[in-house]
């Protein structure tokens, strides 16, 4: 019984700790492209080309991409490269042993990453949008990369060819809570090498990728929202009808 109480107490602190960890760097608002089929299709292409090499999305099948306007032929020609079938799950071919050797840990499955990263600091889409745009060069890290949203991240910058290489600039300041300590305050990024895209174009591509990751976490979300509106309208009409019938009934009684 005591052990169970301890476990419950620890679990109660987990969400708070997660929110505290995610709130150290302000999150940018991700663009809402949940109904933009062209953006979702481009995001799916980016996901397959840049994310699926290391990560999996084991809760998603390729043929579900028909929900965002792709045909079986388009999926086969543009998104299947290693003999997969349209009905297969979106898994990578990297073994867990190799992944742990190269990255220190097995890359997480991304099926519901946009939902898992939501906190009081912002939505999961906001977290991903900021995370993918705040990588910087850090030679002290094993991969040569670090991230403002996820300090000491183990994942390298998969999109560096698009964004280019940047340094993060910090200045030393006194800790406002302890004058005897010095903190390093982030003041901005400094370009080292250009990528194939300028920053605005890169941000746009990241917006499409994040929109796809958000859609993948709940492919039926747009249908759910539409049904919700229909149900609310129906309930409003039903309530109005019941109200008028009630008034008519009691009018005759009086």
Image: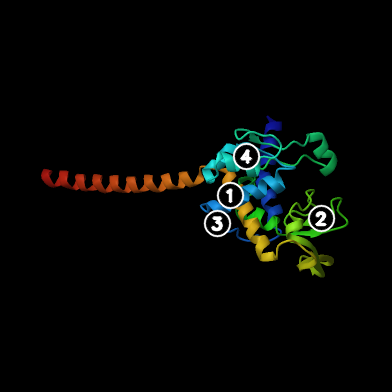
Calculate the distance from the C-alpha at mark 3 to the C-alpha at mark 2: 28 Å
Query: Quick one: label 1 or label 3, which is nearer the N terminus?
Result: 3
* Residues under numbered marks 2 and 1 in contact, where contact means CB atoms less than 8 Å apart: no
Disc 4: which residue: 76
Instruction: Describe the element under mark 4 as helix, strand or loop.
Output: helix
> Within 10 Å of the Cα at label 3, are there few (<14), some (14-19), or many (20+) other Cα atoms?
few
Element type where label 2 sits in the image: strand
Q: Which numbered tag is attached to residue 145?
A: 2
In the picture, measured across the screen, residue 245 lies left or right of residue 159, that is left
Q: Give the residue at mark 3.
A: 32
- Mark 1 vs mark 3: in front: 1
- Pointer 1 and pointer 3: residues touching (CB < 8 Å)? no
Please say if the residues under marks 3 and 2 sit with CB atoms less than 8 Å apart: no
Tag 1 residue: 41
Question: Which callout, 2 or 1, points at the residue further toward the start of the chain?
Answer: 1
Q: How is the image coloured?
A: rainbow
Q: Nearer the viewer, mark 2 or mark 1?
A: 1
Residue 208 location, quadrant: bottom right
* Residue at (71, 53) in percent of width and height: 21
Q: Are marks 4 and 3 in contact (CB under 8 Å)?
A: no
Q: How many marks?
A: 4
């Amino acid at each position: 019984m005591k052990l169970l109480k301890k476990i419950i107490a620890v679990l109660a602190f987990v969400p708070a700790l997660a929110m505290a960890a995610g709130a150290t760097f302000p999150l940018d608002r991700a663009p809402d492209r949940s109904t933009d089929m062209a953006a979702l299709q481009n995001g799916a292409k980016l996901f397959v080309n840049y994310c699926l090499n290391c990560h999996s999305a084991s809760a998603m099948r390729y043929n579900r991409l028909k929900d965002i306007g792709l045909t079986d032929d388009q999926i086969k020609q543009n998104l299947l490269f290693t003999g997969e079938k349209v009905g297969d799950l979106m898994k990578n071919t990297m073994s867990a042993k190799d992944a742990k050797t190269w990255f220190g840990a097995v890359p997480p499955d991304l099926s519901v990453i946009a939902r898992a990263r939501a906190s009081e600091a912002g939505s999961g889409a906001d977290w991903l949008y900021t995370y993918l745009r705040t990588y910087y060069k850090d030679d002290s890290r094993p991969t040569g990369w670090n991230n403002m949203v996820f300090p000491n991240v183990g994942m390298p910058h998969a999109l560096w060819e698009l964004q280019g290489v940047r340094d993060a600039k910090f200045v030393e300041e006194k800790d406002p809570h302890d004058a005897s300590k010095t903190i390093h305050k982030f003041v901005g990024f400094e370009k080292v090498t250009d990528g194939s895209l300028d920053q605005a174009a890169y941000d746009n591509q990241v917006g499409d990728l994040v929109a796809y990751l958000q859609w993948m976490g709940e492919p039926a979300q747009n249908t759910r929202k539409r049904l919700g509106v229909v149900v609310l309208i129906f309930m409003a009409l039903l309530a109005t009808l019941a109200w008028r019938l009630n008034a008519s009934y009691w009018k005759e009684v009086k």
